[in-house]
Amino acid sequence: MARSFFKLAIPSIGLNAPNVTYRINLSDNHTVPWSADAFDIITTYVKSTARHLVFNCHGFAWRESFPAPHLSLGTVFHPGNVAAFDPIQQMNGLFVIWLSACNIACSEAGRNFLQDISRHAYAYVVGAAMPVGDIQCPKYCVEDWSGSMPVYIEPGGRLMARSEFLQLKTFLGIT
């Protein structure tokens, strides 16, 4: 199967977990230490001029050791600290938060978590319900996870169809 990619407008920020095989290569990239908490990650690494924010980490809808949906970045993002996304609302340009994290949207709790992220950040959120690719993306790009049953959420938390999201590509700074 041929892979396809979305090229993201600049500036865009990539937040990479230390244990991912391939790093997102955007205009501003960071490998986030495990010791960083969710609030510090957002306030330290996310600039107000960014158009896109990509979390490149492992995602879990549920684990026996952590039975809540979470993004394995820093000390983890989860429903209990979703307010860490609040500062993003004040940013002028951020449009889309991309969660390159397997299975994060595969459960109702996971989709609710993504909807809460969109409400707190007031941004579009895209997350996959199945595994995402483990490949190196071209510079300034994120993989189009169309085969991973992506979930698209608009600011405010409403689930939207892929076709609705794709109609906004020009507005969102995606080619």
Image: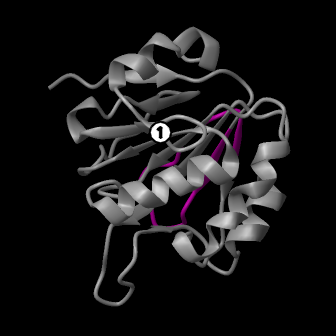
Q: Which residue is mark 1?
A: 158
Q: Nearer the viewer, residue 32 or 101?
A: 101
Q: Residue furthest bottom?
A: 65
Spot occupied by residue 98 in the image (x, y as percentages of width and height): 51, 42
Side of 47 relative to 128 (left or right): right
Q: How many marks?
A: 1
- The chief SS type of the magenta part is loop
**Who's the residue at 28% across and 88% down the image?**
64
Q: What residue do we see at 71% from left, 65% from top?
A: 84
The answer to whether residue 152 shows anywhere in this view is yes
Q: Which residues are magenta?
A: 13-29
Residue 24, image x, y percentages: 54, 43
Q: Residues within 10 Å of mark 1 (few under 14, many from 20)?
A: some
Where 146 falls versus 120 (above or below)? above
Q: Amino acid at mark 1?
A: Arg
Q: Residue at x 76, y 34 (%)?
A: 50
Q: Residue at x 48, y 27 (%)?
A: 138
